Image: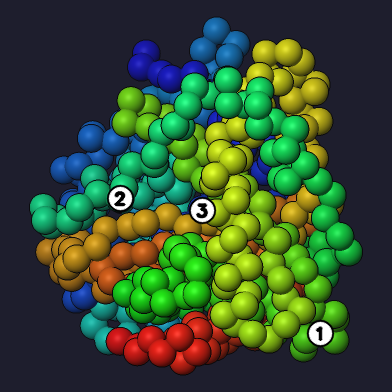
Amino acid sequence: MDYEPLTAEDVRILELESGTIRGHTCKVIVIGDEHGAEAVREHLAERIDTVPALRRRLGSVSGRPAWVDDPGFSLERQVLASGSADDAGLRRLVADAMAQRLDRDRPLWEIQVVSPLAGERTALIWRIHHALADGFTAMRMFRTLFLQSSGASPPPAPRPPSIEPRRRAAAELPGTLRRELRRRGSDSPLDRPVGPHREVAFVDASLDELKRIGHAAPERATVNDVVLSAVGAGLRAWLKELGAPPERLRLKVPVSLHRLDEEGAANRDSFMMVDLPLEGSDPVGRLVAVARETRNCKQHHDAETLDEFFRDLSHISRSLERFAEHWAMSPRVFTLNVSNVPGPQGPQLVLGSPLLELHSLAEVAHRHALRVAVVSAVGRISFGLCADPDVVGGLGVIARGISGELDALGEALNVGSD
C-alpha cells in the first residue's frame, strides 16, 4: 500500500479542527466562458496523477496516522456541480462551503463548479484541508492541476536562512520570544467564541498599484507591508463603527519556509507578529510604522528562529511543545491572522479559458473570529475575508476600509491607480 506518515505539524493542524472550527482553506477560481462539472473532471483526470496527495485520505499504518491511497477515489465525488449564480450568490455558496466540514472518509479536498456565473463565466470553489497543503503548497498544486500557460514564472522561492539555523536561534531566541510571543495589550472584539456560521467578502486591487505605493513610501515598504497597513485601516473603520477605541492590534503573519529540497512537505511555515497602529488616521504614517516593524522582524530572522524553537521543544518535551503552541495560538498573543501568497502573474489559461480572478480564504480559529487571506494573480491582488457574522457584524465595513486605505495611500503618495 502506498502511504505517507503524517508529520507532527499535519497532526497538530487536524487537532485544531473541532466543534465549530473547520480546518480547510479555499481558492475561488473565476474563469471566462461556461464549463460544467464534467469538463472539470475530464481536465483533472489528465493531471491528478501528478499530485498523488490528492488521491489519499486519512488512515493509519501500523497504528500511526498516515495518508493512504483511497481505493474508492472518484472525481465524481470530489468535483460537484453547484448550478448557476450571480456574484452575490457565489459569495453565499463560498460562505456555506467554508462552514461545512470536509469528509474525513475521503480525500480532504473538494471542488464545487458554479456555472454559469453571471457574465458568461465559471467559478471553481476549491476547498483543501490545511493539513494537506499550506498556502505555498496549495498554490503549487493549483499551477500543476489547472494552469495551461507555459509562460508564467513561479512564485519566488523563500530565501534560506543566511546563517546556520541553530547558531542563529541560540543568539536570537530571547529577543525573538519577547517580540513575537509577549502578551498583547487590551482585549479585542474579535476575541469571542466562534459559532458555526461564516460570511465572506473580497477586496480586489491592482498589484502594480500596491508596488508603486511601496516604492513611493518615505521608507522602503513591501507589497505585504501595504497589505497589512490596509487591513489595519479596515479594522480601524470597523472598531469605530462599533464604538470601540481604535487601539493597537497585533497581527500574526505566516512566513513560508519551504525550500527547493522540500518538495514533499505539505506544511512548512512559521510566523512573525506585527503591531498595527490604529490610533491615527494618517495612512502613510501607518504604512511606515508597519514597514519598520516587519523589517526589524526580518533582520532578526524571527520566523526562522521560532521554527527552530518549536522543533527543539518537540525533541525535549511534547507537553512543553503543546503548551508553547497553545500560547502562540492564543488571542492573548495576537488578534488576527493575515496571510499573503504570491500566485501566477501574466495571462493564464484554465480549461482553455482566461483566468479572470483568483481569491483565497482561510478558516477562522478559536476566539479569532476573523481571518484574512491575500493572494496575487494575473496582475491583481485579492483580500479574502472570512468571519463569523455573529461576532463580526458588518464585514463590508472592513472591506470598504481596506479599499479606502489603498485609495488614500495612492492619493497621499501621488500614485496613480490603474
Q: What element carries label 3?
A: strand
Frontmost of labels 3 and 1 is: 1
Of callouts 3 and 1, which one flags the residue occurring earlier in the amino acid sequence?
3
| 33 with respect to 155 (left or right) | left
Quadrant in the picture for residue 114: bottom left
Binning the other alpha carbons within 10 Å of mark 2 as few (below 14), some (14 to 19) or many (20 upward) gives some
Binning the other alpha carbons within 10 Å of mark 1 as few (below 14), some (14 to 19) or many (20 upward) gives some
Q: Which amino acid does label 3 sit on?
A: Thr
Frontmost of labels 3 and 2 is: 2
Mark 3 and mark 2: Cα distance apart in space: 19 Å
Residue 352 visible at all? yes
Q: Name the residue under label 3.
A: 25
Residue 47, which numbered label?
none
Residue drawn at x 47%, y 75% is 217
Q: Name the residue under label 1.
A: 242
Residue 214 coordinates in the image, percent (x, y): 43, 71
Q: What residue type is labelled 1?
A: Leu
Mark 3 and mark 1: Cα distance apart in space: 28 Å
Q: Are marks 3 and 2 in contact (CB under 8 Å)?
A: no
Q: Which amino acid does label 2 sit on?
A: Pro
Of callouts 2 and 1, which one flags the residue occurring earlier in the amino acid sequence?
2
Q: Name the residue under label 2.
A: 155
